[in-house]
Amino acid sequence: MNSTYEPQPGEEPEELPATEKDLAEDAPWKKIQQNTFTRWCNEHLKCVHKRIGDLQRDLSDGLRLIALLEVLSQKKMGRKYHPRPNFRQMKLENVSVALEFLEREHIKLVSIGE
């Protein structure tokens, strides 16, 4: 079975079907959700003088994620993390600290993808 999309007669070759457009990386609804979530995060991070500009880049080292979780839960991580992660391993450990915190607090992550 061929998984590439074949255009229908009269349809532009580069045009994607509606379902593929909705799932595309630059789908308008994804940008709206991303911007809304970023603003929500920034609103909560204000009190600790931190800010998110790009979700993927700014959460990747774990520091803003840890700060957000501490603000929302009003609890400290309870485990040391790297305050200045210079290496990928340090960044991954920080993200793990945040995920372990969620697990300890019995917070279930749902609909997490990509």
Image (spheres, rainbow, N blue to C red):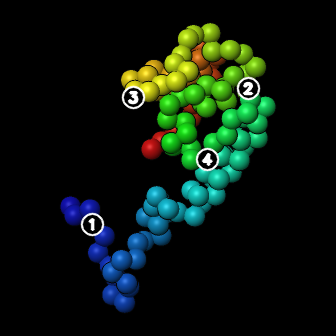
Q: Secondary structure at mark 4?
A: loop
Callout 2 environment at 10 Å: few (<14), some (14 to 19), or many (20+)? some
Residue 108 at least partly seen: no
**Could you give the CA–CA distance between mark 3 and mark 4, rounded to whole angstroms?**
20 Å
Give the numbered dot on residue 86. none
Name the quarter where the N terminus is drawn: bottom left
**Residue 6: where, in percent of width, then height?**
29, 75
**Could you give the CA–CA distance between mark 1 and mark 2, rounded to whole angstroms?**
46 Å
The residue lying toward the viewer, choosing from 36 and 84, is 84
- Whichever of labels 4 and 2 marks the residue nearer the N terminus, that label is 4
Residue in the image at 39% along x and 28% along y? 88
Instruction: Identify the residue at the far right of this view.
Output: 47
Which one is closest to the eye, mark 1 or mark 3? 3
Q: Amino acid at mark 3?
A: Arg
Give the numbered dot on residue 4. 1
Give the numbered dot on residue 53. 4
Image quadrant of residue 46? top right
**Residue 77: where, in percent of width, then height?**
63, 15
Which one is closest to the eye, mark 3 or mark 2? 3
Give the numbered dot on residue 71. 2
Q: Secondary structure at mark 1?
A: loop
**Could you give the CA–CA distance between mark 4 and mark 2, rounded to whole angstroms?**
18 Å
The residue lying toward the viewer, choosing from 63 and 18, is 63
In this view, 18 is above or below 50: below
- Is label 3 in contact with label 2 (beta carbons under 8 Å)? no
Which one is closest to the eye, mark 1 or mark 2? 2
**Could you give the CA–CA distance between mark 4 and mark 1, rounded to whole angstroms?**
35 Å
- Whichever of labels 4 and 1 marks the residue nearer the N terminus, that label is 1
Q: Amino acid at mark 4?
A: Gly
Reading the image, the residue beneath label 3 is 88
**Residue 14: where, in percent of width, then height?**
36, 77
